[in-house]
Amino acid sequence: MKIIEFDKDGSENRSRRVKILEFDRGQDWDTSSVRAPAPQPAPRASSTPEWNPSHARRTSTSLKMHVLDLGQLRLDKNFVVANSTVATAREPNPFGQVIDIPVSAYYIEHPDGNILYDAGCHPDWSGPNGRWPEHLQNLFPVIGGEECMLPNRLEELGAGPDQIRHVVLSHLHCDHAGCVEFFRKSQIVVHEDEFAAAFSHYAVHDESKPYALKDLERWLRLDLHWRRIGRKEPDQNLVEGVRLLNFGSGHAYGMLGLAISLRSHPSVLLVSDACYTAENYGPPMRPSGISHDSIGSARTIERIRATAGDMKADVWFGPDADQFKTLRKSGEGHYE
């Protein structure tokens, strides 16, 4: 085992404090089949992929899921729950409410290939030369020490990028895909509409959405192994007990989730920002303040609710601070 340290541009630097483990005898995954987009099946009558809950009940006897605490974002609550602060005739200038919401990722150990769901913020997100543009640094500052960065959380578990077969990205916003560049051998799974939208923003230098253009530029320079999930592509098993959920358009241009079937804990739906919090989930459903497609977002939440009922599963929202406090973090144990 050796320790590789990365500089701001992702290149090796022995003086860099943020570290990633690389294992000399790690699994050499076959990524030859993932450079091109997956073949698209014939369109279905419905725009929503069909869900068969029996597929998700197949548990793996050796699956272990670790909850990674990657710090917090500090932001106005109106971004999370729309119209949380509303001016009235009696109170025309109400005080806003600033809250801290968790940034998280989930590392799943599995004999058929380990999986990482989401990749947090890049360690060099801030500062004059940071990955994030100044307005995003001001709107959504990251709260947390170096120990909260994804490379260090994986290091605590003795895990390195070469040990992870699939990196599933719920979407490509800067607080969910910042560390993608470290996973040079992994299959990086992303929705095709999200992939196209993010790089369209890059091509025209559009920083109006929370895509970090410096992250995108770095990805273009690397030989990363992307697998793009088609808009009509059905839900599918990644490995036994872990099912990829194609949510489609909503919070972002294309959202992906995971259904995890566990033995000693209720099954779990990982939904990331497809549904921010229990307050959004309802019922009644309350929309978030950041949504590319509000109708798609509402449809997705209804689908999540139906799927959770079919599976008898818990729904783990992405940035719900109250729920996240109740979860067992990677330093405290795991779920299986």
Image (spheres, helix red, strand yellow):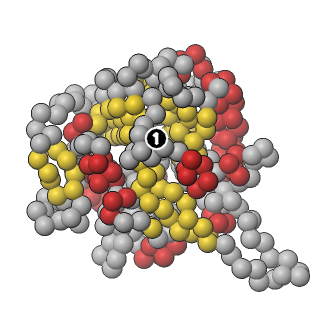
Residue depicted at 69% across the width and 28% down the height: 309
Q: Position of residue 19 (x, y in %)?
A: 21, 56
Q: Which residue is labeled 1 in the image?
A: 191
The answer to whether 84 appears left or right of 59 in the picture is right
Quarter containing the N terminus: top left
The answer to whether any part of residue 214 appears in the image is no
Instruction: Look at the picture and state if 92 lies above or below 286.
Output: below
In which quadrant of the rendered view does residue 33 lie?
Answer: top left
Q: Nearer the viewer, residue 330 or 121?
A: 330
Q: Amino acid at mark 1?
A: His
Occupied quadrant, residue 84: bottom right
The residue tagged with tag 1: helix, strand or loop? strand
Crowding near pointer 1: few (<14 within 10 Å), some, many (20+)? many
x and y percentages locating residue 125 in the rendered image: 36, 67
The residue lying at 47 percent from left, 71 percent from top is 141
Which residue is located at x 22 percent, y 51 percent?
20
Quadrant hosting residue 88: bottom right
- Image coords of residue 72 (percent x, y): 48, 62
Q: Residue furthest front?
A: 332
Q: Residue furthest right?
A: 90
Q: Is residue 84 above or below residue 269?
A: below
Does any portion of residue 256 appear in the rendered image?
yes
Q: Return the x and y of residue 96 as percentages of the image width and height.
A: 68, 76
- Residue 262 vs residue 89, the one in the foreground: 262
| Residue at x 19% of width, y 59% of height | 6
Q: How many marks?
A: 1
Quarter placement of the C terminus:
top left
